Amino acid sequence: MRVRLGLVLCAALASANGGCASIDYLAQAAAGQDDLLTRSQDMDRLLREDRLPPRTRRLLAEIPRVKTYGEANGLRPTNNYTKYARLDRDAAVWIVSACEPLRFRSYTWTFPIVGTITYLGWFHLDDAKRAAEELRGKGWDADVRPAGAYSTAGWFDDPLLSTMLGKGAEARGDLVNTVFHESTHATFFVPGQSRLNESVANFVGDRLAEKFMKEIAGEDAKETVAYFAGEERSRKRETKMHAAYAALESLYASDLPRDDKLAEKARILRQLEKDLGSKRTLTNASLVQFKTYHSGEEELAELLAACGGDVKRLVALLSAWQHERMATDQADPAKVLRPLVTQGCTR
């Protein structure tokens, strides 16, 4: 799964409701945001002064065209990615998520304005590990994973980070996808619906990146071929993740004794780790976060088809609809989107 963070809350937004998020988290989020702003340098000036390595220069020079392309396809204009910040680490943040051990129900944190969210981003790995260990001590499955990208979903002018620049030939397409993904967050956001927000951003980012690479980079270009090859590898991983999720969901709904469920759960997850070549221990929290980015895909595909394959029309439809009140926090995107599919593409 491509690691990206769609939203990390900062203390500048507001204090947390009812102590649901710790002061420690809010303090580190504010400090981390401040550090990013301190490190940020004007991208145009960096490019003019030719002080960047050639490869970095080429990737950064692409950003204005990517943003213009996104805006032409319905994404909201922002001041994001006009600055560049070089980080001295391999990840922008580390994502902590948690889930019940024998049910796919996420642990949630509650904040004003944005409601509940199913993950938190920590700017230091040790802090993330401590947070995960605290959740495990309370009986939750917990997961820590690196995220190369970071976004405040339109609250601040986000810089482009060095951790968003990949190393292989697919780096151009991956960067394009990430910018579209994060720009979708600034365009479409429903409070209390992490799965819906991330799944929409994932879907729109993928579709626009595909269009961009074919139309702008060229369908036969080396970078385009490498990007699509990477996407195909990701799809194969996603298929295995989906299968494991479905198998575990069925297991948890069965009448087997708890100990038998735990034993079979461990077998399924260890096999998944082997199939994926994963260096991380996978848990329910890993799989529930995977579903956060990959839910409602069938419904979104149907909506896009109803909009004649026009991403701009799809974005306009979703943006107009995002103010609808959802029945519950963290609702299943497939169920939430189904009435909209029935209604059709009216914009």
Image: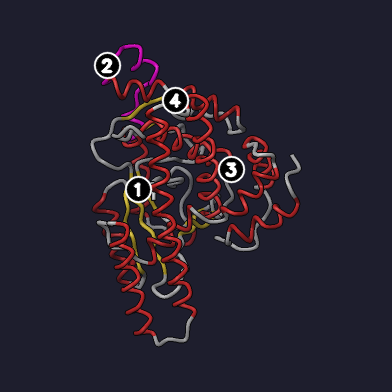
**Does the CB distance between marks 4 and 3 fall below 8 Å?**
no
Q: Which residue is mark 3?
A: 188
Dot 1: element: helix
Cα–Cα span, label 1 and label 4: 31 Å
The answer to whether marks 4 and 2 mark residues whose Cβ atoms lie closer than 8 Å is no
Q: Nearer the viewer, mark 4 or mark 3?
A: 4
Q: CA distance from mark 2 to mark 3?
A: 36 Å
What is the crowding at mark 4: few (fewer than 14 residues within 10 Å), some, or many (at least 20)? some
Q: Amino acid at mark 4?
A: Ile
Mark pair 4, 2: CA separation: 17 Å
The residue carrying mark 1 is: 27
Relative depth, front residue between 203 and 226: 226
The mark nearer the N terminus, 1 or 2, is 1
Task: Report which quarter residue 40 is drawn in.
Answer: top left
Q: Position of residue 207 (x, y in %)?
A: 54, 39
Q: Is residue 42 magenta?
A: yes
Quarter of the picture containing the C terminus is: top right
Q: Main secondary structure of the magenta part?
A: helix
Instruction: Give the foreground label among 1 and 4.
Output: 4
Circle 3: residue type = Phe
Q: Residue at x 42, y 31 (%)?
A: 224
Q: Is disc 2 in contact with disc 3, using a CB cutoff of under 8 Å?
A: no
Residues under numbered marks 3 and 1 in contact, where contact means CB atoms less than 8 Å apart: no
- Element assignment for label 2: loop
Q: Which residue is mark 4?
A: 63
Q: Is residue 229 left or right of residue 320?
A: left
Does residue 29 appear anywhere in the picture? yes
